[in-house]
Amino acid sequence: MLLLTMLLSGCLYPNDELEKNRVPNEDQLELVQKSVDDYREQTNGLVPIKTKEEDTPIFQKYLVDFTALKAKHLITEIPGNAYENGGVYQYTLITPEDNPRVKLIDLRMTEAIREVRVKLEIYRNEHLYPPYGEEIENGVYKLNYKKLGFDSEPYVVSPYSQKNLPIIMDTDGQLFVDYRMDLYEALQKNEHDYKEGEDIRNLLAENSPFVPAYSLPYTVRNGEPVFLENNK
């Protein structure tokens, strides 16, 4: 009984051992990157990714397939912070066709969005339209969070700035994260040649270990990030 209690409470594990699953680790990223590069060399340019639906959002589409890497003995164990090993990150690839690079999706964002989605589905079972709040621009809306039963506006914690980022909604009732605060800082801090009409989200992915999951496309106008029109 004592052993069971210790197991359930996590007392058998030092705090730093538990914490390793909750922080990005540069060594682990480099290890997975090398494994992906070696896999490409062995397979004439193929990348080890899980099969996803064609309409999967771009930053969630190319998840690293650790089973494929292990099958070719390119990796001995899955990183401790990976979802497949009990961690809070999914390993994914950006630009997989020409220059695949390993990045992370913070699944704590996924949990926050899932909580809102559950309440949204309950609401839509009783009402014809989603609970739109104020229109931000281009058919993008804030949530009427009170109608969903929240006491305050729901948010996710940014993996870039640790700021609270709003959860927003499109005309179809699909949920997204509003990255405008992070994109504004990235535009100020990083050199770029983006022009109005071009999707600027890679500015975040290129300059950090994380991809902007659950994001709508953004562009730049007068030095500030705005939602890209025709963003479906």
Image: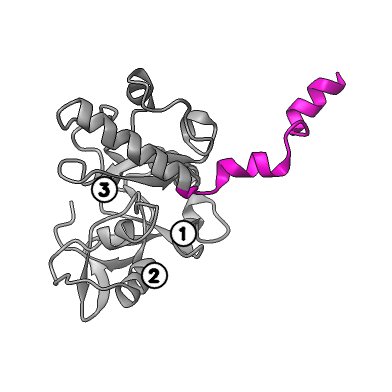
x, y percent for residue 99: 20, 46
Of circles 1 and 3, the one toward us is 1
Q: Secondary structure at mark 3?
A: loop
**Label 1 Cα neighbours within 10 Å, binned few <14 / some 14-19 / many ≥20:** many
Amino acid residing under circle 2: Met
Position of residue 58 relative to residue 74, above or below, is below
Residue beneath disc 1: 158
Could you tell me which quadrant the N terminus lies in? top right
The one nearer the camera, 200 or 172, is: 200
The one nearer the camera, 144 or 7, is: 7
Q: Tell me if residue 133 can be seen.
A: no
Query: Looking at the image, do the residues carrying marks 1 and 2 touch, with CB atoms under 8 Å apart?
Result: yes
Amino acid residing under circle 1: Ser
In terms of sequence position, does the residue under pointer 1 or pointer 3 come before the other?
1
Query: Looking at the image, do the residues carrying marks 1 and 3 touch, with CB atoms under 8 Å apart?
Result: no
Residue beneath disc 3: 172
From the viewer's perspective, tell me whether residue 69 is left or right of residue 56: right
Alpha carbon of mark 1 to alpha carbon of mark 2: how far?
A: 10 Å
Numbered circle sitting on residue 181: 2
The one nearer the camera, 11 or 213, is: 11
Provide the major secondary structure of the magenta segment: helix
Of circles 2 and 3, the one toward us is 2
Q: Residue at x 87, y 22 (%)?
A: 2
Position of residue 152 relative to residue 29, above or below, is below
x, y percent for residue 108: 50, 46
Position of residue 163 relative to residue 38, above or below, is below
Alpha carbon of mark 2 to alpha carbon of mark 3: how far?
A: 24 Å
In terms of sequence position, does the residue under pointer 1 or pointer 2 come before the other?
1
Position of residue 172 relative to residue 134, above or below, is above
Numbered circle sitting on residue 42: none
Magenta region: which residues? 1-26
